[in-house]
Amino acid sequence: MLERLSDWWRRPCGGRDVVAVALPLVISTMSFSVMTFIDRMFLTWYNTASVAAAMPASMLQFAILSFPLGVVSYVNTFVAQYEGAGKQKRIGPIVWQGIWISALAAPLLLATAPLAHTFFASAGHDPEVVAEETIYYGVLILGSAPLILAAALSSFFTGRGATRVVMVVDCSAAALNTVLAWMWIFGHCGFREGGIAGAGLATACCEWFRVICYAIIMLRPTYRSRYRLAAGWRWNWALMRRLFYFGGPGGLQWLIECGSFTLFLMVVGGLGKINQAATMLAFNVNSVAWVPMMGMGLAVSTIVAQQLGANKPDMAARATWTALLIAFAYMIAMSAFYIFTPDVFLMGHRANMDPAVFQQLRDVIVVLLRFVAVYVLFDALNVIFISAIRGAGDMRFVLCTSIGTSLVPLTLAWWGTHAMHWGLYWCWTLITLWVSVAGLIYLARFLQGHWRTMRVIEPEFCKKVS
């Protein structure tokens, strides 16, 4: 038994190799999860309307920028396949295409700010919550362009497997955000009390901090020459077309899923302020499990892309199954915590909050976390297998699946709450089915094996099998 475990750990693309790439990314995404958790906790202390407004506003922002962000994030797959194929000179130019996309997207994103109030008001939210949502979105959108730009710059490191750099930068940004949010929400250290606007400004500043850190590191002479980071700055039509061909479906997938989820939150918001706030806090607690899995997913996508660039699909498959085993172990543990010790995750929210209001929220959140405990297990399938086929370039299947699995539960949620007058638990039942069905579909697609012959880089740059 010990010998088999040792072999599983030490073999190529086994536990050790997956953890070496994934652990820094998991820590990086956990830092984002902790940052978001603390922001929501601060807003819970500040005002119930503020915490109810935070997630719809942030989800709307993410939905608006999801298409360019999805395209730019696909730079990681190109970098990984070029690295696997030994074509480092192609890495700088593809990173620059992502930078150009972020620059073009910036003015379009800023132009959406005046429309926020109309959108939130039309969803039927409490007027106090609408006011907070509008303020938060207007500030958050200032950090949208640097968020996309940081995705392009970080892909230079994640695609090559240099994930520790991303870990250090992102953890530093999360720590900075916590300090700034504390000062700017409550008005500490001589700053004016900003409430939810202070939370949004802290987040926007930290996105610019990430961009500056990545840019400084990439100025190293060895990077500039080896990867053509200086010489490859020009707009490249051939590379841009290739990036949109493969990354475009990924961007549309993000847009559809994030847009559907945002509309779903709008439906829940129409069920009352307590139900909306409880849902936001339940998702906030769930981020402790889900967000680190995004780091594992990025690691899977990177390793699969590198191995396919080197024409080693069997190694890519091995890494995927190894990551799934690790993900399941983590998700099972989190599921048990959600069922048996839910109050551990709510201790921070209880502090500085009206006990009567907290008890109302707590009674609902405990039930919602039982739904979370079920669907996180299927979410492991979702994250791991969608990341694997993403690393291969099978994005059209992902897009088609997202359309079906997103629009159906959204329609049923609206019908159930408006026509049948079913409540919050109907919506959460649909969320659970949504995640579970998607995870099983992506598992089936991976088992079919079409991804093994797919590549995103030019065929002439792929390594030949010896």
Image (cartoon, rainbow, N blue to C red):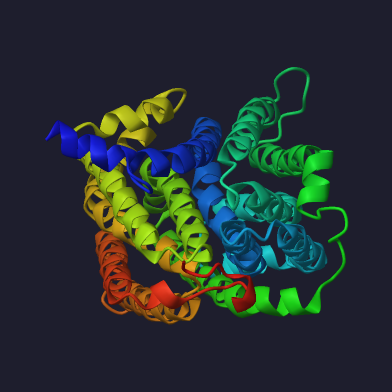
Which residue sits at x=57%, y=70%?
462
Q: Nearer the viewer, residue 86 or 362?
A: 86
Q: Is residue 2 left or right of residue 417?
A: left
> Which residue, as the protein is rendered here, is positioned at the far front?
466
Residue 39 position (above or below residue 189): below
Q: Nearer the viewer, residue 355 or 191?
A: 191
The answer to whether residue 337 is seen in the rendering is: no
> Which residue, as the protein is rendered here, is positioned at the far top?
189
Residue 359 screen position, x and y as percent: 31, 34
Which residue sits at x=57%, y=73%?
456
Residue 196 position (above or below residue 413): above
Residue 84 screen position, x and y as percent: 56, 58
The answer to whether residue 226 is seen in the rendering is: yes
Q: Nearer the viewer, residue 119 or 461?
A: 461
Q: Nearer the viewer, residue 408 or 85?
A: 85
Residue 315 screen position, x and y as percent: 37, 57
> Which residue, as the protein is rendered here, is positioned at the far left?
1
Which residue sits at x=29%, y=60%?
428
**Within the image, what quadrant is residue 320 found in?**
bottom left
